[in-house]
């Protein structure tokens, strides 16, 4: 009797367990189906993506944003017949040439008072963690936080839009928007508006728009984003900021080196890092020297420049003779071996603080230039430990904290082509999903905390003022006495 009761009880428990499992499976299946049928929204990402500030209203609204995914990039090469892109963003997915007809959109939540800035937003990547509001009214990027945790200047080349508002690139907008969400005050500072005073008596200063900036208003850190546009003036401003004990990433010496491609390659060669064979171009060009040391085709490029501009593929001696009359002989140029195995493709790795944060393969649609800004497409690539070491070693060789390292793929080895001190990252973020500004601000927060501790330990030097020795004192000239003439009545003549 006891055995029968126990068996019955066990059977009942087993049936209940089976029913529970079936119900759970049905619930999971139904939930999955419901999720699949529901269009994606940004509600899950909004809470972590937006930080509410005192000067913003708490009222929210939703707007449509373009959704850019990795497969959009790969589809570009198959969409040559697509319609012209009329997006007003400053740097679009395929650089204003073509767009994917099956354009995706997503609803995102924003503070209602953002509507006045005329947003044209994009959300980037499958995980939808990267977004850019892309405000058309660029006063959006001049707002000030009340109590920021960190103050940072980003040095840019000032340009104007048609309505006389400042023009900001994709990267400048991303830096500002990401900083705002982290309660970091970023100010986009136009390099041509700076002035400086160099003196020993406390008036050593930096000025902006003609006004001296008080020391208490100095930023915690400065990030120059001047690229190939950095000149003597820009370097002087960066050097002055360093002399005022402000943390600058990247520093003056590294910027001075990497703005010149030949100087960069000289440093890499000194450190035994593989590079394409390179020589400086002398005008008039002696083709016999080139023929002795290079095989055609060759690369002829400006010693400064970015985004694939100022780069030519020269096929023969006759072609280079013909180019001689058209080239600006006042601008230095370099001649470089053409790595045929890497034609139309290269690897761009971004190095930050001695670490590779991601890498992508850049592939040209046609021709030999693989730059994203020249219409090429990009895809993520996983670097081996050795290739990561190569990228990091190259960045460290030229002392860059933040660098874009371009790697060519030769038949038997990798070679460093160029190192960019101000890398663009629109294509990089689209390919890899890595949030570059977020990574950079993590590094800046760490670096500034160390910098402050070091700064407190520094002993403030007083100006060295040596009294002038007696024999060096210039004696003031004695007043010369003049003869006074008087008349018979005693009056001065």
Image (spheres, rainbow, N blue to C red):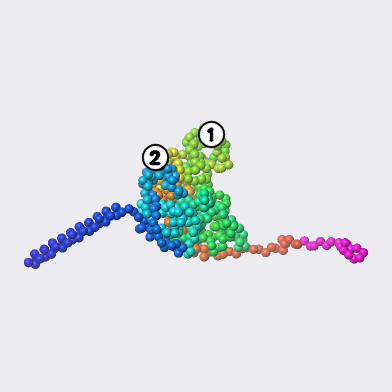
Taking the spot 56% from the left edge, 36% from the top edge, the residue there is 325
Q: What is the residue that sits farthest to the left in this orientation?
A: 1
Residue at image location 48% in from the left, 51% down from the top:
169
**Principal SS element in the magenta part?**
loop
Q: Position of residue 380 (x, y in %)?
A: 38, 48
Which image quarter is the N terminus in? bottom left
Name the residue at 42% across, 59% down: 112
Q: Which residues are magenta?
A: 477-493
Within 10 angstroms of label 2, few (less than 14), some, or many (20 or more) residues? few
Foreground of the two, 124 or 478: 124
Whether label 1 touches label 2, CB < 8 Å: no
Q: Residue furthest top?
A: 318
The residue identified by callout 1 is 322
Separation of marks 1 and 2 at Cα, in angstroms = 36 Å
Instruction: Please identify the quadrant where the C terminus is shown.
Output: bottom right
What mark, if any, has residue 81 been given in the picture?
2
Decide if residue 224 is on the left or right side of residue 474: left
Dot 1 falls on a residue whose secondary structure is helix
Q: Secondary structure at mark 2?
A: loop
Let me know if residue 450 appears in the view: no
Considering only order in the chain, which callout, 2 or 1, is on the residue closer to the N terminus? 2
Q: Toward the viewer: 436 or 462?
A: 436
**Number of numbered discs:** 2
Please check the rendered image and state whether residue 344 is part of the magenta-colored stretch, yes or no: no
Q: Is 82 above or below relative to 483?
A: above
Q: Position of residue 51 (x, y in %)?
A: 42, 61
């Amino acid at each position: 009797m006891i055995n029968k009761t126990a068996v019955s009880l066990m059977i009942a428990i087993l049936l209940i367990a089976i029913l529970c499992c079936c119900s759970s499976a049905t619930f999971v299946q139904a939930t999955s189906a419901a999720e699949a049928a529901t269009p994606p929204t940004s509600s899950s990402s909004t809470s972590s993506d937006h930080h509410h500030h005192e000067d913003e209203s708490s009222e929210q609204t939703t707007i449509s944003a373009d959704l850019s995914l990795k497969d959009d990039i790969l589809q570009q090469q198959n969409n040559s017949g697509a319609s012209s892109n009329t997006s007003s963003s400053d740097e679009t997915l395929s650089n204003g040439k073509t767009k994917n007809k099956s354009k995706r959109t997503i609803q995102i939540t924003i503070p209602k008072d953002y509507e006045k800035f005329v947003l044209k937003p994009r959300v980037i990547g499958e995980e939808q963690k990267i977004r850019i509001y892309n405000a058309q009214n660029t006063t959006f990027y001049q707002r000030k936080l009340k109590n920021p945790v960190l103050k940072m200047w980003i040095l840019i080349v000032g340009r104007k839009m048609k309505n006389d508002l400042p023009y900001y690139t994709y990267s400048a907008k991303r830096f500002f928007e990401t900083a705002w969400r982290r309660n970091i005050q970023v100010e986009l500072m136009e390099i041509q508006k700076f002035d400086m005073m160099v003196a020993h008596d406390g008036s050593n200063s930096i000025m902006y728009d003609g006004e001296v900036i008080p020391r208490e208003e100095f930023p915690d850190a400065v990030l120059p984003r001047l690229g190939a546009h950095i000149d003597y003036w820009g370097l002087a401003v960066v050097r002055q900021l360093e002399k005022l004990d402000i943390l600058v990433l990247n520093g003056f010496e590294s910027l001075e080196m990497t703005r010149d491609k030949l100087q960069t390659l000289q440093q890499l060669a000194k450190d035994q890092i593989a590079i394409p064979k390179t020589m400086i171009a002398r005008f008039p060009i002696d083709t016999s020297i080139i023929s002795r040391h290079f095989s055609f085709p060759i690369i002829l490029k400006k010693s400064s420049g970015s985004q694939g501009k100022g780069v030519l593929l020269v096929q023969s001696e006759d072609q280079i003779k013909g180019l001689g009359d058209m080239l600006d002989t006042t601008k230095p140029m370099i001649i470089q071996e053409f790595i045929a195995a890497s034609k139309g493709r290269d690897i761009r790795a971004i190095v930050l603080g001695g670490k590779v944060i991601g890498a992508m393969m850049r592939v040209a649609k046609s021709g030999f230039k693989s730059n994203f800004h020249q219409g090429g497409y990009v895809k993520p690539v996983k670097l081996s430990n050795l290739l990561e070491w190569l990228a990091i070693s190259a960045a460290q060789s030229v002392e860059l904290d933040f660098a874009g390292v371009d790697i060519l793929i030769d038949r038997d080895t990798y070679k460093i082509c160029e190192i960019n001190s101000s890398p663009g990252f629109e294509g990089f973020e689209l390919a890899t999903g890595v949030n570059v500004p977020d990574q950079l601000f993590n590094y800046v927060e760490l670096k500034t905390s160390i910098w402050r501790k070091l700064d407190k330990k520094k002993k403030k030097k007083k100006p060295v003022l040596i009294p002038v020795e007696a024999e060096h004192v210039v004696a003031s000239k004695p007043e010369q006495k003049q003869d006074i003439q008087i008349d018979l009545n005693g009056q001065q003549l």
